[in-house]
Amino acid sequence: MLYPTYLRRSDPFALMRSMMRDLDRGFWPSPSRAAFPAVNVWQDAEAVAVTTELPAIEPGDIEIAVKDNVLTISGERTTPEVSEGARWHRGERGYGKFSRAIRLPFAAADDKLEAKMANGVLRIFISRPVAEKPKKIEIKAA
């Protein structure tokens, strides 16, 4: 890419910043693309909830497992079909196998796991075991 000469005259570092922006856009993985799929995790007294966006992936192509307090989400996003002779102009979405492992704050079993997928968003709910649920202790007046 050609860079204008006025950038070099007014600010000696402007050319370097411009080249770094171009490199960040096309060659180096950005922090936002570092982990796929991105997840949100939160918990309450009853369960842990995990949500992740998995566009263009069928629910049957996703595997969810819990083992040793670790939730694993894995699958594969296939490359789209393009016509013969077509040229790519930009390729920002990643394709291939993926896997994310999330440590859970409590021991959970597969039978306590519920997963729903709607509009490309996967929601996983993992119920807390009864033995680990917080118990409310009533204080008796003396």
Image: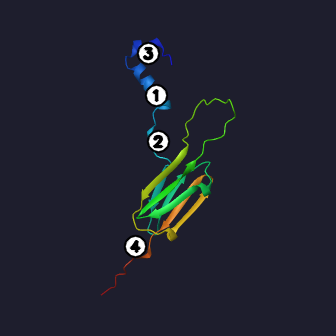
Q: Is residue 123 above or below residue 137?
A: above
Specify few, some or many for label 4: CA neighbours under 10 Å numbering under 14, 14-19, or 20 or more.
Answer: few
Residue beneath disc 2: 32
Amino acid on which the number 1 mark rests in the picture: Leu
Amino acid tagged 2: Ser
Q: In the rendering, at what x and y percent does residue 138 appear?
A: 37, 81
The numbered mark at residue 23 is 1
Report how far apart the C-alphas of labels 2 and 3 lie in the structure.
Answer: 29 Å
**Mark 3–mark 1 distance (CA, rounded to whole Å):** 17 Å
Outermost residue on the right side: it is: 83
Element type where label 2 sits in the image = helix
Local packing at callout 2 (Cα closer than 10 Å; few below 14, some 14-19, many 20+) is few
Give the foreground label among 2 and 3: 2
The residue indicated by pointer 4 is 132
Count of labels shown? Answer: 4
The x, y position of residue 39, in whole percent, is 48, 52
* In front of the other: 112 or 51: 112
Q: How is the image coloured?
A: rainbow
